[in-house]
Amino acid sequence: MSNKRMKKKYLIISMDMANLAAGIVFRRLVMAMSEYVDCHVICPRIDDSVNNTINVLQCPKYKRLPNRLETSLYNLLGYKLTDYIWSNKVFRKLKKTIRKKKYDAVLSFVYGGNDSPLILGKRIADGNKLSWSIYSVDAIPAPLSWSKNEKFRCKRISFLNKYISQADAYFASNPIMLEYELSLFASFNGISGYVLTPCVFDHSLCKESNTHTEITFLYAGDLYGPRKVSSLLKGFELFSQSNKGSKLVFVGNNAPSHFNGFEHLLESRQVERHGFTKNIKDFYDRADVLIDLNADVENDVFLSSKVCNYLSYNKPIITISNNGSPVRVLMSGISSIIHSHHDPNEINDAMYKAVEFVGRDIIDRESLKRMFHPKQVARIFCEELEKLTDYVR
């Protein structure tokens, strides 16, 4: 792969490589992949940085229907009509261009309920006799612990099975998520693997905290789904009883209802609630300990992006999850990352353990940083994809 003349040429289809969380992941991955393979991209929402370095095939904009109409049609048809409309437009517009490019493989990058890359990817692969791989940064569909609509979920599984079962390879974003996906789509018999979320590590962010008694804990992100914030608030309340002046700071789009029953902590300013901000660096600089809050369910499939971002900082991390979670599988055995279940007493203990690291130089995460580095993630992914490029459909 190091020989430039021998680079494989891949066509990558995604609905976002801009500012959405999934789009940032895809953008980082494609930029890193470009060192090993020749990447061409079809994407209606794309950051200028990709345009400047990657071959972008111009495509029509994706136009959504009003939410109510889109939902009604999905319940009736079992798929999003606009996904097929957009895919057909792109296929007709780029059919000749794609044939001339002579790609080695087609890759569909998907997230959430965005199925256009699946529809378009399969059609292009079939029409050009190319291998076809899927990479999903999300669990599709989400487990019932995250999505309570069982009827909708069954429709999603039925639709997705038509495509995933015919793919040559399927990649999830962590091993727990991969196991979950394979359990849903038993008819899939291609190559499978996982592609970790690539994280950019900024050494300039490694500002040390000074040792002091008034400790500030930071949770940077939104609260939604089965993330049980009440156990964190109760655990902090226990900690603060013996550590006066300590603070727990939340930064993100978090409704007041998440703090029901703990209004006294907000009133006393022991707990601070701040809205979304692009100037998050100031909050990181103030913090002594970083908090990662995961779902209060066994064997959850999601690894939060924030815990990977936290690795840049020279600060201890408390990660709250239950047994079988990706963060426990991938980040256990590192002293400066303290794991806790959703139990207030255990969280209180974790806070005391984290305080021992405040002001110390944290050096036990280098292997994790290498594992999540975009270059490493892309290299492994490209090696897996190369196994498929000689396959003719």
Image (spheres, rainbow, N blue to C red):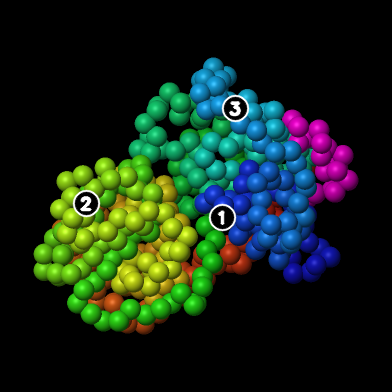
Does residue 33 lie above or below 204 as drawn?
A: above
Mark 1 or mark 3, whichever is nearer to me: 3
Identified at 64% across, 28% down, the residue is 82
Local crowd at mark 2 within 10 Å, few (<14), some, or many (≥20)?
many
Query: To which residue does mark 1 refer?
Result: 25
The magenta span reads: 88-105
Does residue 309 lie above or below 161 as drawn?
A: below
Q: Specify which label sits upstream in the sequence, 1 or 3.
A: 1
Q: Distance between the residues labelled 1 and 3?
A: 26 Å
Residue 146, quarter of the rendered image: top left
Q: Distance between the residues labelled 1 and 2?
A: 30 Å
Q: Where is residue 54 in the image (x, y as percent from the top left)?
A: 74, 58
Residue 149 sits inside the magenta stretch: no
What secondary structure is marked by label 2?
A: helix
Identified at 79% across, 69% down, the residue is 3
Task: Check disc 1 and give the amino acid type.
Answer: Val
Local crowd at mark 1 within 10 Å, few (<14), some, or many (≥20)?
many
Q: Specify which label sits upstream in the sequence, 2 or 3.
A: 3
Image quarter of the N terminus: bottom right
Q: Specify which label sits upstream in the sequence, 1 or 2.
A: 1
Q: Where is residue 167 in the image (x, y as percent from the top left)?
A: 65, 39
Q: Position of residue 304 (x, y in %)?
A: 42, 54
Query: To which residue does mark 3 refer?
Result: 65
Identified at 14% across, 70% down, the residue is 243
Q: Name, please, the residue furthest toward the top.
A: 76
Does residue 152 lie above or below 176 as drawn?
A: above
